[in-house]
Image: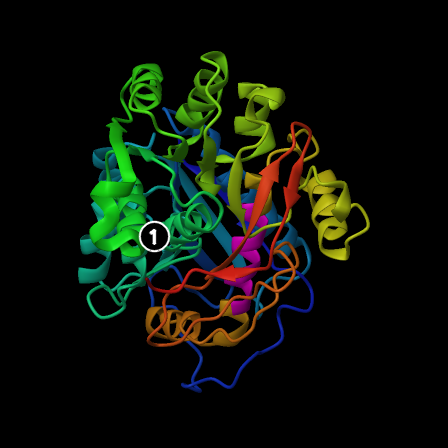
Amino acid sequence: MLRRTLLKSAAGIAAAGAPLLRSRATRAEDTPGVTATEIKIGNCVPYSGPASSYGVTGRADAAFFKMVNDNGGIAGRKINFLSLDDGYTPPRTVEQVRRLVEEEQVAFMFASIGTPTNTAVQRYLNQHKVPQLLILTGADKWGNYEKNPWTMGWLPSYRTEARIYTKYIQATKPAARIGILYQNDDFGKDYLIGVKDILGDKFDQSVAKVVSYEVTDPSIDSQVVSLQSAGVDALIVAAVPKFAAQAIRKVYDIGWKPLFFMTNVSVSVGTVINPAGPEKAAGMITGNFVKDPTDPAWNSDPGMQEWRAFMHKYLPDADTSDGLYVWGYGVSQTLMQVLKQCGSDVSRENVMRQAANLHDVEIPVLLPGIKVNTSPTNFHPIRQMQLARWTGKGWERFGEVIEGGTA
């Protein structure tokens, strides 16, 4: 179902930002989806299917743009946000994106969810020079600006995240027998690559077992049992929320106590921890980059107070323990900075040019010390994380903000 939200941008965002590389205003006929009064933006997220919990990001984006429009728009234009359900199914993503680009004539795609789904349309969008902008997946390949100059992610790289976990294992449990459970696609495989980056030729010696699952599988219980049986005592899981919750429950239910790492895309209290059972996740570690809405440390934080006021007004019935709403708010704020820098020139070329020129942008829902930075040779906007451990009641951050870097 086509979800239309006619939106206007937050006051103060309308002003022109960085100096423009082109001075003329974009006319309606120059760029599909852009008129003197509107910017039409496309989005695909799974409102249904095995990854439907991620659909809240689309709701957050839509609500954010409603707030933006209520406050005057961006450079005199309202945002017409068209969000479609792809069910986390690549063939359906292809169908929906073609609809948005060819029939709805969107100016660009923004914040679509999923590695396999975005992969399915990456070539099409790049061939047609349609920005695939700030997509919500951390696959490392979204940073390949030379091969796919019209694609840019937003989340920290999964490969970088895996490097951070592996370095932590080396530092705290050097003799660990590592096990990896991953989704059998580019999302999950990036974690394997990241571990190999650090271990190198010691991978086979250090990694006791690697198992995968398909997104169509009903359960991953057997994979968890097989990892325990292999003597694994340091476990890295790269799974979407449904399977992440299953893994947490199964690890607990069989009495297994490995050093346990969970991908940062599946640690929302509302969609993963609570369904699994908060006590069952105790001791689990992840890498965070946004502020956790359940952490009392942020009760008086101006950025999170701003987010709570937004949620209260525009999404009053939403579960505010779900950190994915924070994602949606943060990525939408990043887009507003891009459009602010575009000024009157909202051509597809200038949108990508400005997206590749973000310098120390502070997004109030990101953790302290983490800023958005891009350049024409850096399409990884967020490259830092901080480790956090689930206490059974909340996430407890520890250590310094880390940039994964290379092996």
328 displayed left or right of 195: right
Residue 364, percent from left and from top: 66, 59
Quarter of the image that includes the C terminus: bottom left
214 displayed left or right of 332: left
- Segment tinted magenta in the rendering: 327-337
6 displayed left or right of 155: right
Quarter of the image that includes the N terminus: top left
Q: Say above or below: 23 vs 358.
A: below
The verdict on residue 234 being magenta is no
- Residue at 63% over, 68% down: 13
Residue identifier under label 1: 159
Dot 1: few (<14), some (14–19), or many (≥20) neighbours within 10 Å? many
Q: Say what secondary structure mark 1 lies in.
A: helix
- Residue at 60% over, 54% down: 399
The verdict on residue 332 being magenta is yes
Q: How is the image coloured?
A: rainbow
96 displayed left or right of 13: left
Instruction: Please state which amino acid type lies under the numbered disc 1.
Output: Arg
Counting every numbered tag in the picture gives: 1
367 or 252, which lies in front? 252
- Residue at 58% over, 78% down: 16
400 or 2, which lies in front? 400
325 or 42, which lies in front? 325
Residue 363, percent from left and from top: 61, 61
Residue 316, percent from left and from top: 70, 33
130 or 133, which lies in front? 133
- Residue 194 visible in this rendered orientation of the protein: yes
Farthest residue, direction right = 300
Instruction: Determine the image quadrant of residue 88.
Output: top left
Q: Say above or below: 287 vs 351.
A: above
